[in-house]
Amino acid sequence: MQAEQTGLTLTQHIRLEQKAHASATGEFSGLLNEILVAGKVISREVNTAGLKAEMVLGVTDNVNVHGEKVQKLDEYSNNTIIHLLQRCGYLAIMGSEENDEPITIPEKYGKGKYVLLLDPLDGSSNIDVNVSIGTIFSIYKKISSGESGATEDLLQPGNRQVAAGYILYGSSTVFIYTAGNGVHGFTFDPSVGEFLLSHPNIKIPQKGGIYSVNEGNYNLWSNGQKKYVEYLREIDKATGRPYKARYVGSMVADLHRTLLKGGIFMYPADKSSPEGKLRLGYECAPMAFIVEQAGGKASTGKQRAMDVIPAKLHQRIPLYIGSKEDVEMAEKFLAEDL
Ligand code: AHM
Ligand code: MG
């Protein structure tokens, strides 16, 4: 890190990035700052969850659009982020993993030109056991003609994203974002209440040595998928095999490791989930934007993940993401499907 970047706060970084754009009005910086505040609030709740277990741990009586039981902390994070961002004045419409329908902005708060998609708390199965979880966000510009935004605004392909990022609530809380000019990471310093630049201009290795997949699904996979994982487990010093296996089960945590160390994270289609598990709009597309901006690759196995045009808000896709060479090798095995 250059000396002048020491102690650079996320707010300052966003402002400096935007200063480079002659047309910037400050709205985009404002929006990112509101997300940052939501992240601080959720981070506090996650970090103290065990102390208020009755209130914030465990499941609610609700089931979400995906048929999953909603965790109390999921619900809390969703409400926090929605209420905060509805009031910010920069958004026309929002979409969340936890809401079946698009989320409108009440008239009294005023509307803006941006559109937000989010997964308020990803990695639900890890909430109660103190394992890393995260918030994922994706920002687009409104394309519909009305002031209030419409579903079409939430169904834009990932290649139209203006910004994307995630907040990882891990052994420390980190905020990673891209606004199309590289990927930058900040670590929360609780003693000053600020995110400070810790990972400037992140670059993912072109080839890694780690694979990340839920191997419990092995018998549900296609032949190509099975063969690819078997290939990664073979011993061949020259190509760095066998790869190490790492799977947290929280996409944000698995992706953060992949971004910093390289390798591949995958959630393939399988016999019980023919479209894959992960959702395009608020899980796959933002992660794809981040990884591509870091020099990596994100694919459905057949095409660039960011080029998929969503047909519905909660659409799922198979995902292969990480180091360029590793994702290309996965695509090769999937195409052959022998
Ligand atoms: P969630 O949004 O309900 O938390 O589900 C998404 C999570 C990802 O974080 C993770 O990569 C994946 O589901 C794990 O799924 P599985 O338990 O099937 O391996
Ligand atoms: Mg999720």
Image (spheres, rainbow, N blue to C red):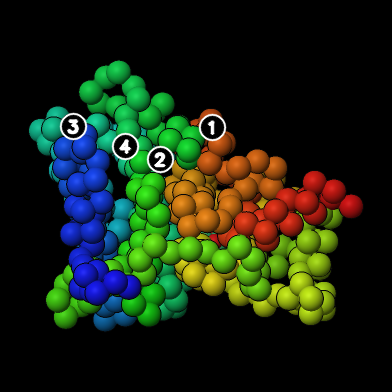
Circle number at residue 309: 1
How packed mark 2 is, by other alpha carbons closer than 10 Å (few <14, some 14-19, many 20 or more), is many
Along the horizontal axis of the image, is 110 left or right of 298? left
Residue 61 visible somewhere in the drawing: no
Compute the Cα span from label 2 to label 3: 19 Å
Q: Quadrant of residue 26?
A: top left
Name which of mark 1 and mark 2 comes first in the sequence. Answer: 2
Compute the Cα span from label 4 to label 3: 10 Å
| 73 over 80 or under it: above or below | below
Along the horizontal axis of the image, is 281 left or right of 187? right
**Mark nearer the viewer, 2 or 3:** 2
How packed mark 3 is, by other alpha carbons closer than 10 Å (few <14, some 14-19, many 20 or more), is many
| 140 over 331 or under it: above or below | above
Q: Quadrant of residue 149?
A: top left
Name which of mark 1 and mark 4 comes first in the sequence. Answer: 4
Question: What residue type is disc 2 on?
Answer: Gln
Residue 121: where, in percent of width, then height? 38, 60
Residue 289 visible somewhere in the drawing: yes
The residue indicated by pointer 2 is: 161
Question: What residue type is disc 4 on?
Answer: Val
Circle number at residue 115: 4
The residue carrying mark 2 has its beta carbon less than 8 Å from ligand 2: no
Secondary structure state at the residue bearing disc 2: loop
Q: Nearer the viewer, residue 118 or 321?
A: 321
Residue 24: where, in percent of width, then height? 20, 38
**Mark nearer the viewer, 1 or 2:** 2
Name which of mark 2 and mark 4 comes first in the sequence. Answer: 4
Circle number at residue 111: 3
**Mark nearer the viewer, 2 or 4:** 2
